[in-house]
Image (cartoon, rainbow, N blue to C red):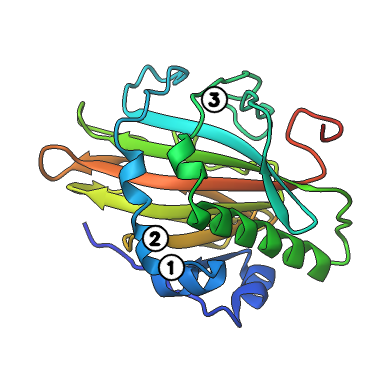
Amino acid sequence: MLEYLPTTTSLNELLPQLRNRGYAVLDFETVVRWAGCSAENLLALSPDWVGMPKDAYLKDGGDYRSRRHSCFVYEHGQLRLAPARAHWQPLDYNALHGGMKRWFDPIASKTLEQQVWIDLLSAFARTASDLCLDDQSKQVDGPWCIEAHQFRIDTKNGIGRPTPEGAHRDGVDLVGVFMVDRQNIKGGETRVFDAHGTSGERFTLTEPWSLLLLDDARVIHETTPIQPTAEGGYRDTLVLTCRAGAFQGDKTNS
């Protein structure tokens, strides 16, 4: 299968790209500069995707997804861990799993305590803030509420589905998808569509710790299923969502 690699964006062009196209891709070196972190420390996070608990909520009956989930609040330049909460989305945004309160094991303390983790989530919140401040139609009031999801999609049973809900939006201000690792698979093509038109792009994220940023109001996204090319195939991602003022399902942030 022919893979189309994404066109990457420089830091100087990040906000213009998000404004004009609704998405942008940063390569590994640019992510390091964006987050102000160490390349070595960023790569050292990757083993934390090994041995995660299985997702028990898959309505398609699959057993291909492992995950962890934690929430954070970024306010006044500081990131703090929020109390444990269920992941919830309305049916309007997730027709397969919407309306369910899904409780997942939290991200491990050894991950959260790393400075590079704080650097990544802080840079993500600052980008959301810059994007909203640049858009006069959006009013940012209150803290940035971040949900972080560690995903491993495996191919032990033949096919793994990164987005079993299909093409979707998340109901937030900004989405970030880090390609942590992919081994012994084919597929996993990312598709991004204009939420209010007919245009779309497709590409495959392959570089470890490259990053896809999505203006959730502007675009719809999905990732195609993966299949093994050898035993032990998997795809690891870190998905971040950022929403101003409150987590989904809350009227105000506590």
Numbered-mark total: 3
- Given contact means CB atoms under 8 Å apart, are the residues at marks 1 and 2 in contact? yes
User: SS class of the residue under badge 3?
Assistant: loop
Q: Residue at x 28, y 62 (%)?
A: 3
Mark 1 crowdedness (10 Å alpha carbons): few <14, some 14-19, many ≥20? some
Instruction: Report which residue position mark 2 lands on.
Output: 41
Amino acid type at circle 3 is: Leu
Q: Residue at x 21, y 47 (%)?
A: 185
User: SS class of the residue under badge 2?
Assistant: helix
Mark 2 crowdedness (10 Å alpha carbons): few <14, some 14-19, many ≥20? some
Mark 3 crowdedness (10 Å alpha carbons): few <14, some 14-19, many ≥20? some
Amino acid type at circle 1 is: Ser
Q: Please tell me in which quadrant of the rendered image residue 230 appears.
A: top left
Instruction: Report which residue position mark 1 lands on.
Output: 38
Q: Please tell me in which quadrant of the rendered image residue 15 appears.
A: bottom right
Provide residue 244's location: percent of width, then percent of height.
Answer: 79, 48
- Given contact means CB atoms under 8 Å apart, are the residues at marks 3 and 2 in contact? no
